Image (spheres, helix red, strand yellow):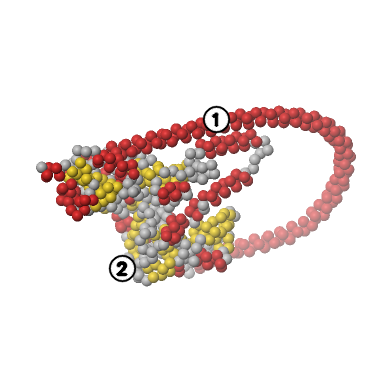
Amino acid sequence: MEQKKKKQEDVLVVRDEKTGEISVVAGLDARGYPKRAQAKAEHSQEFLRFDRHGDAIDNFMRNFYRQCKEPTRFGFYRVAADTVEALLPVIKDLLKDPVANADLLAPHKVDTSAYQQAEEQQTTEEAKKENAETETEEQQAAEEVKRENTETEAEEQQAAEEVKKENAETEAEEQLTAEEVKKENAETETEGQQAADEVKRENAETEAEEQQAEEEVKKENTEENNVEQKTDEKMEEMKQKNQEQQPQAAETQTAQGQQPAQEGQAQAKPEKPNLIADSDVDWKELEQFGVKKENLSEKDMKALMNYGKTRLVTVEPVLGGERYELQARLSLQKAEDGKLKLTPHFVRHEPRLDVPYNGYTFTDEDKQALKQTGNLGKLVNVADTKTGEMRLAYVSIDRLTNEIVDVPTNKVRIPNRIGLTELSKAEQEILRAGLALPKEVTLKGGRKFEAMLQVNADKRDVEFVPEHLWQGQSQRRGNGQEKKQKSPEAPDATGQQQKEDGNQENGQRRNRSWTNEDGSIRPIGKWKDDKFTEQQKADYVAGKVVVLANAKDDKGQPCTKYLKFDREKGRPLTYSENPDLAQTVAPSNESRTQLAVNNEGKTNEATRHVKEPLQQGQTAPKDDTQKQQQEKPKKSKGMKVS
């Protein structure tokens, strides 16, 4: 009887899908995350136990979904309390391949879909309530605008009547003035006629004098023409003599191995040769990554053959017998044996700033600088990857791949001129130290603009730091208001200007739910399924990016997205890529394949024939049904280069 009673009590085994850690649930912490304990006898008092026939587990799961900000990160399995120590190693082995072992795990797996649906329904109802309040505010705002427009129309009508009255008075005055002008014009015409007669008489005398002067010039020109004719005859004789001598000179140049220069044709400037010869490259190695030489652009080839990096291209490496499409930059590097080796620089989710880089550990200030501008902003000692020798270098982030790169200081030339703008010695020293230099730059075309200059290790040169990375939101708003104040307005555009002001005011009222009266961002506590931490709330109000770990893709499957307030549109927007980093940033690792297939329509060879949308982290068939769909004749894919 005692043994039977023990079997009526269960415990929950939890698996962290992000770390793979498996343990026994011991409750919930302050953030709503599962407390975990090892499945050993000495920890049995910490286990959270459930009556098999009770509803305590329902209360636990509801609290978990209500409090935890990333509930889909955890999977739960129900196991008898007295067998958990023995079964936990078995469950760990089964969870190494949960798709293949789905049938064995099914009796123990806890179905959490109902709790997730209930939490989503509650969130939807709260959103509906907020929308209803917003609509009420917008309706009130619309009525206020309508009333103000009515008052404005009345004032405009009154002003129009006053203008009409003034115009009538002005027309009378103008008519009186016109009669006076007409009288004055008649007197002026008489005086003008007399003056014209005098001018006519003077012109006649002048024409006679000019005719006499022309006859004298004609006589002089006749004498000059005789001299010119003799000169032309002499020049023609010399030209004919030169033509007879040119074939002999051409034969002499040919005999000496020289090419005769064409008349009036400048010598062509020789093109600078590449640092790498075409014959030194193993192009078959390039094709192993699914890239053909002829598909690379001229700019990418120029960079590749001079130890630079191409732009982002699509490579198709074969991993575990399957071909995958990945974004990467390509470069050629010399190996220890002196041979050239193709090196792909794959796109990373984010730069690895928490681990030491070639012997240097980034401080919090370093991380902030790299995330803000992509450049460290100072000189540091890093190890040479080939010799291990410490050297002074610039450090930056490749904005296309999020790879950390460095370049020795002696490999970067600091110019004394940017466009038409001279750099002083002090300004050159600022750049040489890796610091940022704000400077008004004038280009050769005459265009002037404010720029931020800084050494970039990836470009191995001084760069214009992208404007959105160094200009604050307040500065951009200030510039926008200044431009509006400077824009000219026509004298008769009063009504149109009032209409635009009304539309602008109405737009501000419509965005009232997202901003405060002073224009600052109004705080929010969550976004759909993601509840914000205090840090996330502060980042959102500051206009920074907030990571949404519980977002959904176009097929309704969980994925990772990014949220940021858009100043121009006056509301928050979601992105599949981090808008604060490079122009091309890869989605998070666990969502990369999922977003590529579900949102972008790309093909993953391992799930090519699977009909259902991919789930978060899925890269292979998840059950027998999908395996049967996948077991179809595979067709070879063509090479693709972007």
Instruction: Give the camera-side residue of 401 and 56.
Output: 56
Could you say which quadrant of the image residue 113 lies in? top left
The residue lying at 52 percent from left, 53 percent from top is 471
Taking the spot 31% from the left edge, 54% from the top edge, the residue there is 289
Distance, label 2 to label 1, CA atoms, is 79 Å
Q: Give the image location of residue 77, x and y in percent.
A: 22, 45
Q: Mark 2: which secondary structure?
A: loop
Image quarter of the N terminus: top left
Query: Dot 2: within a 10 Å radius of its alpha carbon, few (fewer than 14), some, or many (20 or more) residues?
Result: few
Amino acid type at mark 1: Glu
* Residue farthest to the front, as pictured: 2
Q: Which mark sits nearer the N-terminus, 2 or 1?
A: 1
Type of the residue with mark 2: Asp
Helix, strand, or loop for circle 1?
Answer: helix
Residue plotted at (26% across, 39% down): 58
- Camera sees residue 244: no
Please identify, in this view, whether the residue under mark 2 or under mark 1 is nearer the observer: 1
Could you tell me if the residues under marks 2 and 1 are in contact, i.e. CB atoms within 8 Å?
Answer: no
Residue 569 lies left or right of residue 236; in this view the side is left
Q: How many marks?
A: 2
- List x then y, in percent, for residue 116: 31, 39
* Residue named by callout 1: 143
Q: Residue at x 63, y 46 (%)?
A: 486
In the image, residue 587 above or below residue 391: above
Residue 337 got which mark?
2
